[in-house]
Amino acid sequence: MMRLGFNMFKPFRQHLTYFSNNLSNKKGLVLGVYTEEGKPFKLTAAAEYYNKVSNGQLVKHIELVGGNIKQGKSYVFWGLDNTFQSVAVVGLGKEKKGFHRTELMDQDKETIRTAAASGCEALNSMGIHDITFESFGDAETSAEGSLLSSWKFQGVRTKKDPLPTVNLLEVPGLQEQSLWYLGSIKAQSQNFARFLSDTPSNLMTPSIFCQNVEEALKNLNIKIEIHDKKWAEELGMGSFLSVNKGSDEPPKFLELTYTNAVDKPMVLIGKGVTFDAGGISLKPATCMDEMRGDMGGAACVVATLQAVAAMKLEANLKVLVPLVENMPSGSATKPGDVVRAMNGKTICVDNTDAEGRLILADALVYSKRFVPKWILDVATLTGAMRVALGNAAAGVFTNSDELYRLLQEAGAKTGDRVWRFPLWDHYSTQITKYDAFDVNNVGKAKGGGSCTAAAFLKEFVPENTDWIHMDIAGVMGPDCGVKYLPKGMSGRPTRTLIEFIRSQVKK
């Protein structure tokens, strides 16, 4: 058996208890079976191996329940052998379903993640917390589904639920440990993003966010720089600093550098609003607590960097995270105020709740000094994106067809999809055609809020630079509709970002 440790993430151990000291010593196993209408069921390679180990008991028990286990459903059998007290058999549906062009999804991989979650839930609900998973023919994907579904945020609860330990079933002749390890890195990184995003805002201020990142990344090949308000003032980051004026918490600008190649750096920028009350343009009280997750973009890019460094990918990666709170007070920015960004452009802040684009603007301008290969920013930017796509996919705006192709392929592989929206001049004119200032932070016309927000950001992207903007407002959580992600902030689209970078570099 291969057991996974969580040594990568000390902040988890400081705030969460992964494994209870009083876990039952019972062991469970999750196996798969292919079922197709009109055909006899077929065991996976691992299930075939276990059936031999159990002297045919597995097949006998599957036959007892009719042999037709529907896709995503589990049956739990007891006492089949002396090692595993219980065995959850999960239906995988048709074998080799392939890529679905309409759904933009690798169906086999998504089936595996869902199967792992189904088996985990079935055994965990029965008090079995030592669970071994088979690979389902794809150990990397199995690890993702197993580790994502077996973790949940429990914050500062005094009494925490025991969470499962996760193991890989080793089958003679199958060398799957290295792939399982890669999948575990991706899943654990997304879980780290979930942890950062779901922690209450009084326990995840800009300063505390930086402390958590320092602790999590200190043993990796990453340079960590935490810039303060004075540094931002000297660079003329008036747009960034304007958002934090109403808060007593000092702003931070986190700069992370991973160097492991001879190439221009890829730049990731994450929106880091650790709490968004809306400023003077105050949000409604209903569900305002969810705005602890308004730094979901920051969490994703940091977690992505962590995975890239853990995999030791041959890449140069720069991660920029502007961190603020957006609060109302006597010193807060007022609607109608004009501020100046780092590139000299003046911005009328007509709506202080359209703050994410203000901090990203200065980060985009700052990224120019690194002569980037490309820039990708990630932000819970607009409620309009949630209206447009719900929680099915992240919205994407880009000036590069090739980068979008790679990003879409990454999303199809990870099951965390993206969908492209226009960057037309039609939207740019709505935020630039004014006499008294250069740019307005909201558009003139009704509707198209996600598009005008992207058009605003485009004004600050370095010239002749490939750029992607991801609006993740719909997929942030707290209920993102994914079967292998328990309710809470989702950490999406961390795995898609990892795969996007991984597809462009040497392993």
Image (cartoon, helix red, strand yellow):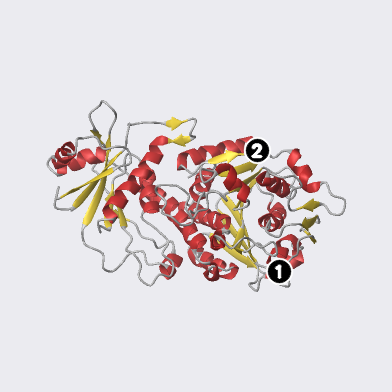
The reply to whether dot 2 and dot 1 touch (C-beta < 8 Å) is: no
443 on left or right of 217: right
x then y, percent, for residue 40: 22, 29
Asked whether residue 119 is in view, the answer is yes
Q: Quadrant of residue 466?
A: top right
- Circle 2 Cα neighbour tier, 10 Å, few/some/many (<14 / 14–19 / ≥20): few
Q: Secondary structure at mark 2?
A: loop
Foreground mark, 2 or 1, reads 1
Residue type for callout 2: Ser
Q: Residue furthest left?
A: 55
For image coordinates 68% across by 39% down, the residue present is 399
Looking at this rendering, what residue extends furthest in the right direction?
Answer: 435
Q: Position of residue 395 (x, y in %)?
A: 59, 43
Residue found 35% across the figure and 70% down from its top:
159
Q: What residue would you read off at disc 1?
A: 245
**Residue 226 image position (x, y, % from top left):** 62, 67
Q: Is residue 217 left or right of residue 254?
A: left
Residue 355 vs residue 457, the one in the foreground: 355
Mark 1 nearby-residue class (10 Å; few <14, some 14–19, many ≥20): many
* Residue beneath disc 2: 400
Residue nearest the viewer, comparing 354 with 113? 354
The image position of residue 501, as x and y in percent, is 54, 45
Q: Is residue 23 above or below residue 382?
A: below
Which numbered disc, 2 or 1, marks the residue that appears first in the sequence?
1
Which residue is farthest top?
38
Q: Is residue 64 above or below residue 449?
A: above
Secondary element type, mark 1: helix
Please name whichever residue, 115 or 483, is drawn nearer the observer in this view of the structure.
483
Identity, as a three-letter code, of the amino acid under mark 1: Lys
Residue 1 visible in this rendered orientation of the protein: no
